[in-house]
Amino acid sequence: MNPAFKDLGAVVLFVEDLEVTRDFYGDVLGLEKKFDDEVSTLYSLDSIALFVMQVSRGNEQLMGEKTAVPRANGATSLLCAPTDDVDALHQLLVERGVQFISPPVTQPWGMRTANFKDPDGHVWEIFQDMGQ
């Protein structure tokens, strides 16, 4: 048995206002909701489960480990999501009210990227391989 990680099964983002976050991920980003309860929502992205969880429940889930949202202290991670057309997705999300922290730009390593934050300060990057 190889003890190495095989994959990443889920990402859990701690959030302050679950209703605002549900609106953002469901209505604005258009992610499909798979599960919902009073403290969390599960969205499915092809190969990974994305949970948004009330920060107070996160503290309980982690058995007392302090939990917070990034905007309290700045970005703590970068969530990267591929797309076929960064410019088109950027435009669609701008039309839906998403404020980007960086517009689409072609990076020296051949990816076209753009970055935005969710309501709790989690930073997302959409990216497209430019085939260089």
Image (cartoon, rainbow, N blue to C red):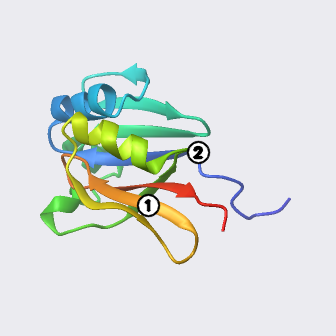
Q: Which residue is mark 2?
A: 9
Q: Which mark is residue 113?
A: 1
Residue 63: percent from the left, percent from the top? Answer: 33, 51
Visible in this render: residue 11? Answer: yes
Tell me what residue is drawn at x 57 percent, y 75 percent: 109
Residue 119: percent from the left, percent from the top? Answer: 18, 46
Residue 53: percent from the left, percent from the top? Answer: 30, 39
Q: Is residue 76 left or right of residue 80?
A: left
Give the SS element for disc 1: strand
Residue at the farthest right position: 1
Disc number lying in front (1 or 2): 1
Q: Quadrant of the N terminus?
A: bottom right
User: Is residue 109 or residue 121 the one in the foreground?
Assistant: 109
Q: Which residue type does callout 2 highlight?
A: Gly
Q: Is residue 81 above or below residue 21?
A: below
Q: Which residue type does callout 1 highlight?
A: Thr
